[in-house]
Image: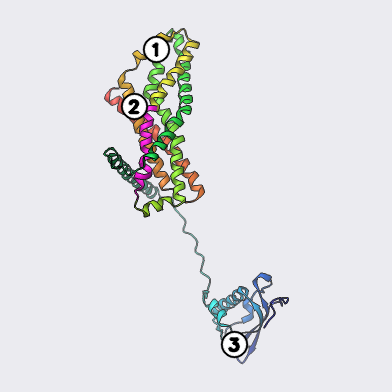
Amino acid sequence: MIPPNRSALPPAWQVQPLDGRAILTLTGDWLAQSGRIPDFFDTALGQRGDSQTGRETLVLDITGVGRWDSGLIAFLWDVRRAANDQDVGIDTTGLPESARKLLGLLPDRLAERRTAPRRRFRPLTWLGGQTIGVLTEIGVLSILLGDTTSGGARALSGRARMRAVDLFANIRDAGPSALIIISVVNFLIGAILAFVGAVQLRKFAADIYVANLVGLALVREMAAVMTAIVMAGRTGGAYAARIATMQGNEEIDALQVFGIPVSDYIVLPSILALVFTMPLLYLYGCLVGMMGGFVVSIAMLNVTGPGYLNQTLGAIGFDQFAFGFVKSIAFAILIGVTSCRIGLKAGRSAADVGSAATRAVVTGIVGVIALDSLFAVLANVVGL
């Protein structure tokens, strides 16, 4: 037995001809961690049918080998590949059984490296793939929206499969907790509209019409759009990050194993919370924005408070409020469905959580603006 604590002997090899064969003799300790494993040279085997040695078989002799590990197997693999290249047979009967099994797991030749085919830009193929991807995603979103709608109908009939505590928690996060940022954004928007309008209308002695400008712009467009953008960045990103985290912690898988519908347990409370709170935040944003315009008008123009209020009430009709109210509900559904969908299809790593939140924010903002343009065309068609 070889003492385990003795110093390692340097590995060495030698090829000698004997009786028409070649003997590969190995000596020393063949340990990969020593870093002294020698290389095997193909020229050591000569040529098949060599006139001097006439060898066609290589016999392995490792009786002089002490300790060995994968370093010996790697060397023998080089020997076998060199022998196969020169059509020289190998006799491995002198190897231990464990070494023969390890060597047998390795291929006779290295796999040829195939160069990757050069990709050509095919615009039709790219367009077709993108179209199929978009249509697939639209179909998945439609199914998710349908499941959520059916869950909402069951909730109205008292057969809801969601927890009331989840709904109230989402309403609190999407409503009262967002009042400060909604107030700041809409107040500044109203002030900016009043300032810009005052600079131009004052030239024509039409100061009082600043109230019309601020009121119509807020009620018809700005309050609904800015509130939706804020909610897409604040609440939509939070929804996507929360669901992506649940995906990474395998909580979604656990719900599916127990047979709990994800659309009812997670998606439905989130969307309903936005549907309940967004119209109210829209009305609140209109009020705060008009206050911002009122402050700027009183400070810059020769306008009285009652006159500003009377002009605002006369310029804004109920149909304008109804139009903005409907838009806010549509924005809420868009933000809720897209954010939950992005969270559900996120990966399971920590980086995927951040990516899901970013995609949800970007998708929500772009979707709100695109949907608002559709509402503008629709309003023009119906004459609003």
Q: CA distance from mark 3 to mark 2?
A: 94 Å
Q: State left or right for residue 141 relative to residue 115.
A: left
Q: Earlier in the sequence, mark 2 or mark 1?
A: 1
The residue under the point 35% across, 50% down is 260
The amino acid marked with disc number 3 is Arg
**Residue positioned most to the right:** 7
Which image quarter is the C terminus in? top left
First along the sequence among labels 3 and 1: 3
Q: Nearer the viewer, residue 17 or 374?
A: 374
- Which residue, given by chain and number where applicable, does mark 1 sit on? 309
Find out whether the residues at labels 3 and 2 contact each other: C-beta distance under 8 Å: no
Judged by its main secondary structure, the magenta piece is helix
Which disc, if any, is residue 325?
Answer: 2
Looking at the image, tell me whether mark 3 or mark 2 is earlier in sequence order: 3
Amino acid carrying label 1: it is Leu
Question: Can you give x and y, in whole percent of width and height, for residue 72 in the image?
Answer: 62, 76
Residue 1: % across, % down? 67, 83
Does residue 238 belong to the magenta stretch? Answer: no
User: Residue at 46% across / 9% down in the picture?
Assistant: 203
Q: Is residue 274 magenta?
A: yes
**What range of the chain is rendered magenta?**
260-280
- Residue hosting label 3: 55
Q: Is residue 129 left or right of residue 192?
A: left
Q: Nearer the viewer, mark 3 or mark 2?
A: 2
Q: Label 2 is placed on what type of residue? A: Phe
